[in-house]
Every structure is written in structure tokens, then in C-alpha cells.
Amino acid sequence: MYTKINGFGIDYIVEGSSTNLPVVLIHGFPFSKKMWKPQIEALKTDYYVVAYDVRGHGLSGVGNGQYTIEYCVDDLVGLLDLLKISQAVVVGLSMGGYIALRTAERNPDRLKGLVLCDTRSEADTNEIKIKRALQAKSVKIFGAKKFANTFIPTVLYENTIKNKPEIVKLLREIIDRASPIAITGMLIALAARTDTSSWLRNINVPTLLMAGNYDEITPPAVLSSMKEQIPKAEMHIIPDAAHLCNLENPDAFNKHLLTFLKKI
Ligand code: MLT
């Protein structure tokens, strides 16, 4: 479904009964809600599942390409308002986790629980900011396809690339159709995001953290450190997975997610 939130086109899907506990899925950069297919299937019987494309991604609008994580939080809150969801369990992977963490800080009353996957609370280091600037320059010159060639191997475990070509194909399709204006705009937004670390100790909803054991972008140690600071947190490391652990090992991911949700 396509709607306007804060004047911006946002594409989303809902599955399951609206009388069930709402679970909102926020994907990573530069992907789309399509990366949540194994979770939507697993959750839709018992939960009210909402998955949407973050602005600039998937089928959502691109606008002028000037984004911030703050606007992404506005979009999430606007979507909750539109769907008349007062509180939800928010599940965010990587960039989705940055949005979820900033929502926990800005709009804690909208959360019933938090699931943080392959993400971090720290802002970018100078080294990462410079890397993003170079990536943005390259996307402007060479386009999204070339970006997909270099980006996809950094987010997947080598055995995923070897044994699960359907995942590589899906990610390539998503990035290939992405707008270079949106990719560069979001790279700048990621570099400009705030550090949410000091707020971790104030998160007072049940929180599940998950990380792929081979994730080199947001390694398990980064999430373990967050877990130590969040009062009601539990953590699981997902085997045979890197940065996209929900897609690379959906069985392990879904088992922990469903067990966590049952407790809420
Ligand atoms: C993501 O998966 O959302 C990105 O890798 C996040 C990032 O680059 O910081």
C-alpha cells in the first residue's frame, strides 16, 4: 500500500489481524521490506505485522534525496499513527536499528519492545564518514549496479554467497532498481546520525539483540556491549550468518524472535 506521510510517499504492507500485537519491521540500507519475507511468513499468524520501505528505498518516494534519520523516525511515527497503533514491537536491522534506537530515545511511549539486529548505537567514526563520502561519489559516477557489486559481498557470509544464490539475486535486484539520488542521500544521512549510546540505559522495554556471527560491519561484540547497557536485554548470536542474519539464517533468527515475542 502506498500512502503519504509528512508529505512523503511511503510504501508498506500489513499482514495478520490488527487485534494482535503489532510488530513493525525496518530494513537495512539500501534494501527494502522484501528482506523481511521469512519473518513476515513466520509472524503473520499470531502478530499484526507491518513492513515498510524507508524513504528513498524500495517503492517509497525518493524526493530530493536530502534525508536524515530524524525524518525516518517521523515517518515511522506517522505510519504508526496512520495504522492507529499506539505501541509496537519495533524490529530494526542495521539502518533499521539506527531508526529504532533513535525512536526509543525520541518516542519511547510508542514502543512495546525492541529488537536490534546487526546494528550499533555509536555514530560513525571519521574513517566511516570518509568511506561513505567515497561510496557516494562512486554511486554518482558509476551508478547503483556497480555499488551492488562491491556492497553485497560486505554484508553476506561467504557460504551464503556460495550456497544461497537466491539471496544474492534478491539483494542485487533491490539495489539495481534503487535511485542513485536515494543511495547517496541516505549515505549522507547515515554519516550525520546522532550517537544514541547514552540513552541505552534508559530503554525500559524488553529488548532482543541479534547479530550474525560473521558480521564485520556490526560485529557481535558491538551488540554485546549494547546488551550490557540496556536494562531488560537478551542477546543471541546467529550462526552461519554475517550482516543480514534474518535472511542468511531465518530458522535461527525466527526461533529467537518468536520466543522473545511470546514473552511480551
Ligand atoms: C545497513 O545494513 O543498514 C548498513 O550497512 C548500515 C551502515 O552502513 O551503517
Image (cartoon, rainbow, N blue to C red):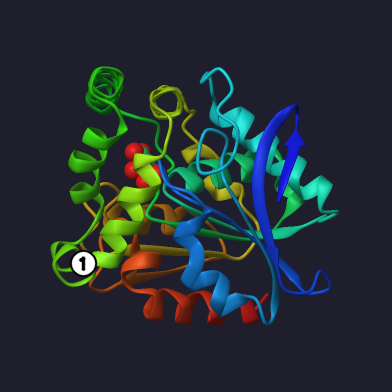
Q: Nearer the viewer, residue 25 or 162?
A: 162
Residue under the point 30% across and 18% down = 140
Find ligand 1 in the image and state its quadrant. top left
Residue 157 position within the rendered picture, expressed as x and y whole percent measured from the top left:
19, 62
**Residue 18 left/right relative to 12:** right
Query: Quadrant of the image for the C terminus?
Result: bottom right
- Name the image quarter holding residue 160: bottom left
Q: Residue at x 59, y 22 (%)?
A: 63
- Whether residue 72 is visible: yes
Q: Is residue 95 above or below residue 182?
A: below
Instruction: Specify whether 221 is left or right of 252.
Output: left
Tell me the residue that label 1 is attached to. Answer: 160
> Which residue is found at the position 38% from the left and 23% from the top?
184
**176 left or right of 74?**
left
Task: Name the side, left or right, on which 81 lies relative to 107.
Answer: right
Q: Residue 211's spot in the image, x, y percent?
A: 34, 62
Q: Position of residue 31 (x, y in %)?
A: 42, 47
| Residue 214 image-quadrant placement | bottom left
Whole-percent x, y for residue 191 in the image:
39, 25
Residue 220 seen from this side: no
Task: Identify which residue is drawn at 66% across, 58% down.
Answer: 13
Above or below for 49 versus 263 = above
Under tag 1, what secondary structure? helix
The number of discs equals 1
Residue kind at label 1, given as amino acid type:
Thr
Pointer 1 residue Cβ closer than 8 Å to ligand 1:
no
**How many residues crowd mark 1 within 10 Å: few (<14), some (14–19), many (20+)?**
some
